């Protein structure tokens, strides 16, 4: 369940790389 945390952190660092994972 740490994927959600990684996705959130990635969204703040590079939200343009994969904005699909955030939604």
Image (cartoon, grey):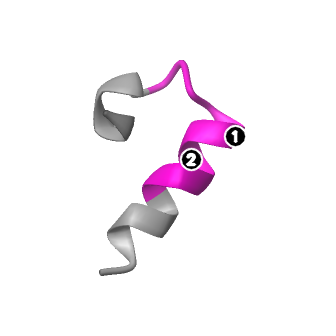
Q: Quadrant of residue 23?
A: top left
Q: Which quarter shows the N terminus? A: bottom left
On the image, numbered disc 1 is attached to which residue?
A: 13
Q: Residue furthest front?
A: 23
* Cα distance between the residues tagged 2 and 1: 5 Å
Inspect the magenta stretch and tell me whether residue 18 lies in it: no
Bin the neighbour count of mark 1 within 10 Å (Cα to Cα): few under 14, some 14-19, many 20 and up.
few
Instruction: State the residue at coordinates (29%, 27%).
Output: 20
Q: Main secondary structure of the magenta part?
A: helix
Numbered badge on residue 22:
none
Q: In the shown orientation, is residue 20 left or right of residue 9?
A: left
**Which stretch appears magenta?**
7-17
Q: Quadrant of residue 4?
A: bottom left
> Vertically, is 23 above or below 4?
above
> Vertically, is 6 above or below 8?
below
At mark 1, the secondary structure is: helix
Inspect the magenta stretch and tell me whether residue 8 lies in it: yes
On the image, numbered disc 2 is attached to which residue?
A: 10
């Amino acid at each position: 369940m740490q994927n959600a945390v990684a996705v959130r952190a990635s969204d703040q660092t590079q939200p343009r790389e994969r904005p699909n994972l955030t939604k």
